[in-house]
Image (tube, rainbow, N blue to C red):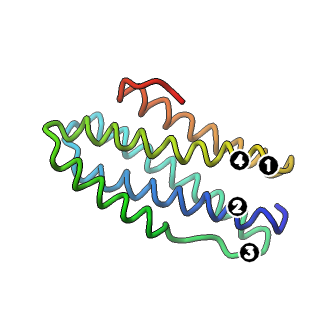
């Protein structure tokens, strides 16, 4: 990874951490066991994604991001408040997670468009993981992909 890509990877790491924390928050509130299992699987996928990107940054001699963003923490808290007012919290969490996950997916796609061959390969592996989460969440939400 080139020196210029470390900040880009760290941006993706921070956004991934934000999303992982939102999934963890949702896990504390959803009731349906199958949904809990799926969300837990998505947390593990995000853990792997974040860990792999952190390893790439470290291997290039840089310090990887280890925390999410303030904006992500605020989004997560607001989501909990909003979902808490919903009559069907599980469905509300699904829609909330699907929206947030789209943003992370688009950020990865944007970074891939500007990446060199080495970084594009690394991001491509992570992007396939994100597509799995994307498909799961949008299928549950009953929304179109995109």
**Quarter of the image with the C terminus in it:** top right
Given residues 73 and 24, the one toward you in this image is 73
- Residue 66 vertical placement versus 134 (above, below): below
Please state the horizontal and vertical placement of residue 37, each as a whole percent of the image.
Answer: 33, 40
| Label located before the other in sequence (2 or 4) | 2
| Label located before the other in sequence (4 or 3) | 3
CB of mark 4 within 8 Å of CB of mark 1?
no
| Label located before the other in sequence (2 or 3) | 2
Residue position marked by numbered label 4 in the rendering: 123
Q: Nearer the viewer, mark 2 or mark 3?
A: 2
Q: Residue at x 43, y 41 (%)?
A: 99
Please state the horizontal and vertical placement of residue 97, each as a whole percent of the image.
Answer: 38, 43
Looking at the rendered structure, the secondary structure element under dot 3 is loop
Residue position marked by numbered label 1 in the rendering: 114
| Label located before the other in sequence (1 or 2) | 2
Residue position marked by numbered label 2 in the rendering: 8
Q: Residue at x 35, y 29 (%)?
A: 141
Please state the horizontal and vertical placement of residue 14, each as a whole percent of the image.
Answer: 55, 63
Badge 1, how many Cα within 10 Å: few under 14, some, many 20+? few
């Amino acid at each position: 990874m080139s020196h210029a890509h470390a900040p880009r990877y760290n941006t993706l790491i921070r956004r991934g951490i934000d999303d992982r924390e939102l999934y963890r928050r949702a896990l504390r509130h959803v009731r349906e066991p199958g949904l809990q299992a799926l969300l837990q699987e998505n947390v593990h996928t995000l853990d792997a994604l974040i860990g792999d990107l952190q390893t790439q940054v470290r291997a290039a001699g840089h310090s990887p991001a280890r925390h999410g963003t303030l904006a992500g923490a605020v989004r997560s808290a607001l989501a909990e408040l909003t979902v808490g007012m919903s009559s069907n919290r599980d469905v509300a969490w699904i829609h909330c997670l699907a929206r947030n996950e789209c943003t992370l997916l688009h950020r990865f796609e944007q970074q891939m468009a500007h990446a060199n061959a080495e970084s594009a390969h690394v991001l491509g592996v992570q992007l396939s993981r994100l597509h799995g989460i994307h498909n799961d969440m949008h299928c549950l939400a009953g929304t179109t992909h995109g």
